Image (cartoon, rainbow, N blue to C red):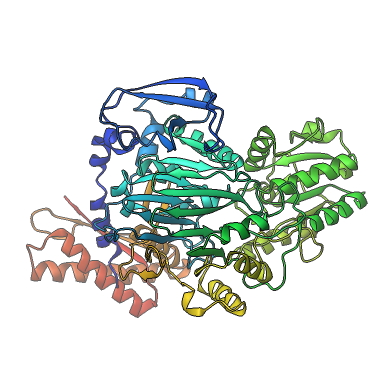
Amino acid sequence: MKDFLDELDKELSIWDDSDIIENLDDTSEKSITEKTAKTETKTVINTVKNTQKPTVKKEIVVIKNNNKSSENNSNVTENNNWKIAVTTKQSDRENKKPQKSSEAEIKWKFISKFPDTKFYLPALRQWYTRYMPIWGNNETWAKNMWMVQYDEDILLIDCWVQFADPDMLWVNYSIPDVSFLTKYKKNIKWFLITHAHLDHIGSLKHVMPALGMPTLYATRFTLGLIRKIFEEAWLMPYATLIEVDASSWEKLKLWKFSVEFFNVNHSVPDCAWIFIESEGGTKIMHTWDFKIDHTPAIDKPADLDRIEKIGSRGISLFLSDSTGSIRKWFSMSEKNVWEELEKIVSNHTRGRLIIATFSSWISRIQQLVDICEKYDKTIFLSGRSMVENVAIAKELGYLNIKQGIVKKMTPKNTEWIPPHKQIIITTGSQWEEFSALSRMAEWKHTSVEIIKWDTVIFSSSIVPGNEKSVISIINRLIRLWANVITKDDWEVHTGWHAFQEEQKIMLQLVKPKYFMPIFWDLYFRTLHKNTAMDTGFPEDNILMLDNGNMVDFAPKNGNVFKSRIKAPIQELVIDGHGMWLANSHVIQAREKMMNSWVLVVTFKVDKKTKAILWHMKLESRGLVYLDEVRFIHRLIIKKARDVYENTVKDVPDMEEKDLLKIIRIDLEKFLLHRLDREPMIIPMIVEV
C-alpha cells in the first residue's frame, strides 16, 4: 500500500516556508517591474492620432525610465512609430492598496509561487512558428490556454480557472501550471484574451504575476471583468491593459507578430476570434467559443464576409470549437429565446418568476429587462456575481436599463410589489453550493423564500458532470411547491457553441491547410474531425493534439512538424492561501480519509528502555460501529503492541520514522485481513 505520509513529507520538503518568507521581495513585485528602474507616471489625455493605432482606453500613462538599459520593458507596447503604456483608471480600491507587509500582499505573493521545473522548451528552428495547447484539449470541461512562439517571442492566449470537482476535496478551484514558462518571462510580452468567461480569464491573477505581468489585450467588456479580478487581487497598479475594437480592421503589430481581433457570437458580449501571423509567414486563425447567430440579442451578427476574406489570405492552421460537435444542424438563435420568455412573462399572473441563468449572460438579462419594461414588471437581482456583472455591463454601455426597472433585492423592496409583478434573476443554474438559488431551495436566502405558485425557470444548459446536482435542486424546489421550467419544457435557452452545420460553414469559409479540433475531450474532437472529413477535408491535414504537444510550421510551404517532446502539463489547485499540484498526496490523503477514515495509535514509552508505559491510546473516526468498537479496539491494541515490541526487540536502535512505518504497514495489513477496511493509520510515539 502506498505510504501517503512518507510521500507527503517529501512533497512538503519542496515547499520551504522560510524560503517564501525570506524572498517575499523577490517573488512577484520585482518580477513585475525592473529592479533598478525608477518610474514616474503622469496621466494625460489621449491625443495621439494614428490610423494604425489600435482602439485603446482614453487614459495613457507615459513612463519615464531613468535606467538607460530598459529594453524588454513589459510596460511599453509598440505599434509602428509610437510607444505608449496603457492602463485603466485606478479605482478607490486601488488607492487603498495595502502595505507590503500586509496580509493581502503576502497572500498574493504566496499563491503566485509556482513549483520549480527543469523542463525547457526545445529549440525552435529559424523562421519556424510553434503552436502548443497548454490546456484546452482532453478535458470534459474546457480549460483554455494556448501558446504561439516565433523566434524568442511568445504569445499567450486565455487563462482558465475551474471550480473544484467533487474528487478535489476541500479545494477552492484549479488553475493551469505554468511553471515551465516562468523561466521565459522576458520572452512572454503579451497576453491575448478572447472573451470574459471564467474558463478564459479566471486564473490571470495567479499566472500574470508569475510571468512578469505581460501586456494584456482584450475587448471592452472583457477588460471590464478582468479589471474587477485584478482590483480584488491588488494587481491593478502593476497591470497594463489595452482595449481593442474587434469590429475594426486595424492590426496590432506586436514585435514579430501581426494580430487581428474580429467579432463572433457567443454568450457574452464582445467575443472575438484572433488572427495571428508571424514574420515566418505562418497564419493561425482561432475560433475559440462561437456560434453563428443571425439575430443575436445585443451583439452584431457574426461577420461571415470578413471571416471569408481573412481565410482568403491562406490560413496555415485553423483551430475550431468542438463543444457542439455532438449536435446536428444549427444552434437556436437568441431571438427564439426572447419570444419564448415573452410568452411566459406576459401570461404569468400568479406567484413570482425566478429565472436562473449565468451571470455573464448579459444578452439574456437585456432580453428580460426589455420584456419587463413592456409588461410593467420589476426585476430583482440575486447573487454577488450577478449584481457585479450587471453593474459592469451597465457602466460600460452593454445594458440599457431604464430607472425603476431593476431594484435592489431586500425584503422591504419586495414587500410592496405584487408577487406576479416580480422577476428575480439569480445565479445558481448549475447548483453551485453557495449560490443564491441553492440558498433559496434550502430556505436560507435572506430575502427570498420559495412558496406555492412561484415559478423557477432554468434558462441554461446543464454543464456535463452537474446533472445529479441540478436534478437535486429541482427536486427541492418541487417539494416547496414551486413550478419548474427547463429548456426541455420550453425554448428558454439556446446553446453557446456551434453545431455541426455551423462547423462546416466555418471550414468552408476559411479553407485552411491544416485543421485542429479543440476544446473538450477526444470524443467531441473526433466527432468534429469526422464533420470536417464530411466536407472533403483531408484526414492527413487534421491535427489531433493533446495538451503539451508542440507543432512547428515551416516558412514558405507551411508544412507542419510535430515535436516528440511534450511539455509537462499539470493542474494546480488553490486551497485556502496555498497552491499545490492536483495529484498532490495531500489530496490523495484526504480522499483516503474520506473513504476509509482514520485511526490514531499513541504509544507512551520509556525514553531509555523503549518499553511501553501505561495503556496505549486509540482514536478512530469512521472506522468502527458502536456495537463493535470495544472488540475491534482490543484487537488493534494487541496487534500494535506485538508489532512494536517485536520490532524494538529485533532492532533496538531503529530510527523512530522507520519504526512508525513498520507499525503502520503491519496494522494496515492486519485490518485489511480481519475487517476488510483500509483506514489511514497514524501511529505516534511519545517518549517519557
Could you tell me which residue is drawn at 41 percent across and 55 percent down? 148
Quadrant housing residue 237: top left
Determine whether, in the image, residue 396 is placed left or right of residue 166.
right
Task: Please indicate, yes or no, whether residue 469 appears anywhere in the rendered image.
Answer: yes
Q: How many labels does the image show?
A: 0
Where does the N terminus fall, quadrant-wise?
Answer: bottom left
Could you tell me which residue is drawn at 23 percent across and 40 percent down? 18
Task: Please indicate, yes or no, whether residue 482 appears anywhere in the rendered image.
Answer: no
Quadrant housing residue 480: bottom right
- Where residue 167 appears, as percent x and y from the top left, is 47, 63
Could you tell me which residue is drawn at 48 percent across and 53 percent down? 276
Determine whether, in the image, residue 502 is placed left or right of residue 237.
right
- Where residue 201 appears, as percent x and y from the top left, is 51, 47
Q: Which of 622 and 448 is in front in this view?
A: 448
Could you tell me which residue is drawn at 25 percent across and 71 percent down? 665
Q: Which of 222 and 49 is in front in this view?
A: 49
- Where residue 217 appears, as percent x and y from the top left, is 50, 42
- Where residue 65 appears, as percent x and y from the top left, is 33, 25
Tell me: residue 478, above or below residue 234. below
Quadrant housing residue 369: top right
